[in-house]
Image: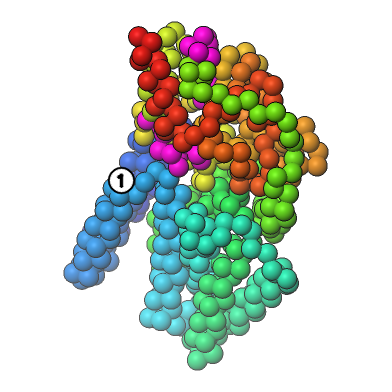
Amino acid sequence: MSLVSINFAYIVSAALFIFGLKMLSSPSTARRGNLLSALGMLLAIVATLLASGLSYGWIILGMGIGTVIGLVTAYKVEMTQMPEMVALFNGFGGISSLLLAWAEYHQYPQMSTFIAIVAFLSAFIGGVTFTGSMVAFGKLSGKISQKAVVFKGQHLINGAILVTAVIAAALFAVSPATGWGYTLFILIVLVALGFGVTSTLPIGGADMPVVISLLNSYSGLAACAAGFVISNNILIVAGALVGASGIILTRIMCKAMNRSLANVLFSGFGSAVKATEGDGPQGEVRPASAEDVYYILEAADSVAFVPGYGLAVAQAQHVTKELGDLLEANDTEVVYAIHPVAGRMPGHMNVLLAEANVPYDQLVEMDDINPRMDSIDVCVVIGANDVVNPAAIEDENSPIYGMPIIETFKAKTVIVLKRSMNPGFAGIQNALFFRPNTRMYFGDAKASIQALIAEFKDAD
């Protein structure tokens, strides 16, 4: 395959990546965008293999094993486990960049200073991404504590790790081909793996959407550096696109939580807040039965569903869509209000509702639904907690004060579907539960909605 053909294939691949990323910004085009990006990656891989002149035996074997694992995992994974799966993907991308840089250095130790620097970046960022993603996976899956693990001298230790990495990188860049160079490279890898753990453990579960998008950016930056190591243009472009889009998404997530990235990474949010569980606003809770909620919904002209992680846990997206269809058949306007950080990863609620075939035009972003919330007859909160807590607006002493929320409390009537009165990830009581216009509909979200569907069908 000629150099011209390879470069042309890379240009087409890069264009497919860019168009794919653009289409991922809208739920209505996200699936096509994902397919375009995948097609671009396939084209890039085929062009690279044809140009390399390698023996394809081991490569085909590795691709076959990876394909089988990917297919089986994709079919078996539950929607509640999707954030953990994304964390694993980020980690695998990071370790791939680390191993690529290590293999290239092992094969060609006579590196220029520039290549030695980007090899360090690929190995260090890749190592941080891998272990950081494994910690995120553990937190999201409940295998390790979701609380922020803050320890004495945490910032000093992390600072010392970074200083060690920079010094080792400087020495490595000067003389990568010496015996000391190899020792320094091993030290860099070990330091990176350790830093991924110590920098992610202090981040609480409430901040996982930010962590997931940040680790995604890390994996892209590591791949970009790896592209410079092996002089592969499409890897540089693809890594840069993933890194840049991840940083933009991270900024969006931070803005949605009214917090800076530094605050997310270094504050240990959640550790001190947990001590306040049970405090916060108290008052009368007004429980409702399935029959009560049915009569409220049946009389409504407009209903807004606000999904949260509880929707994913209960696997209630399909019955929610069925209830929405019944409401529409009753001449009720139905929308689904989406908070940017609802769930455990960016876009979690969009994915869930898309799986249930909810029309894209019914998905309404927070900034669009809030101005019209006071005209909504009934707001149905399904498993959401912190993202609808009025304390973020009204209580200056609240840990989430200033965080943009979906202002459900402004609706004429609020129905909250929840198993119990337990607080959300932020560890504080929700003032919405005690509002005079709020009714608490306790129970498993799926079973509760099925009871409502039964009420509607019995009425027919």
Residue type pointed to by label 1: Leu
- Say if the magenta span includes residue 455: no
Residue reaching furthest to the right: 396
* Rendered location of residue 291, percent (x, y): 48, 18
Foreground pick, 75 / 380: 380
- The residue at the far left in this view is 57
Q: Is residue 221 rendered to the left or right of residue 450?
A: right
**Magenta-tinted stretch:** 295-318
Position in image of residue 100 (x %, y %): 40, 70
So how many labels did they put on this image? 1
| In-image side of 148 versus 68 (left or right) | right
Q: Quadrant of residue 284?
A: top right
Residue at point 54%, 90% (across, down): 180
Where 315 sits versus 300, above or below? below
Q: Secondary structure at mark 1?
A: helix
Q: Relative to 146, is 227 on the left or the right?
A: left
Q: Is residue 297 magenta?
A: yes
The residue most toward the bottom is 179
x 40%, y 15%: residue = 456
Q: Which of the image's four quarters has the C terminus?
A: top left
Is the residue 38 above or below the residue 165 in the image? above
Q: Which residue is mark 1?
A: 39
Image quadrant where residue 45 sits: bottom left
**Rendered location of residue 22, percent (x, y):** 46, 37
Q: Residue at x 37, y 41 (%)?
A: 34
Q: Nearer the viewer, residue 327 or 436?
A: 436
Colouring scheme applied when the structure was drawn: rainbow
Q: Nearer the viewer, residue 99 or 199?
A: 199
> Residue at left 39%, top 43%?
79
- Whether residue 128 is visible here, answered yes or no, is yes
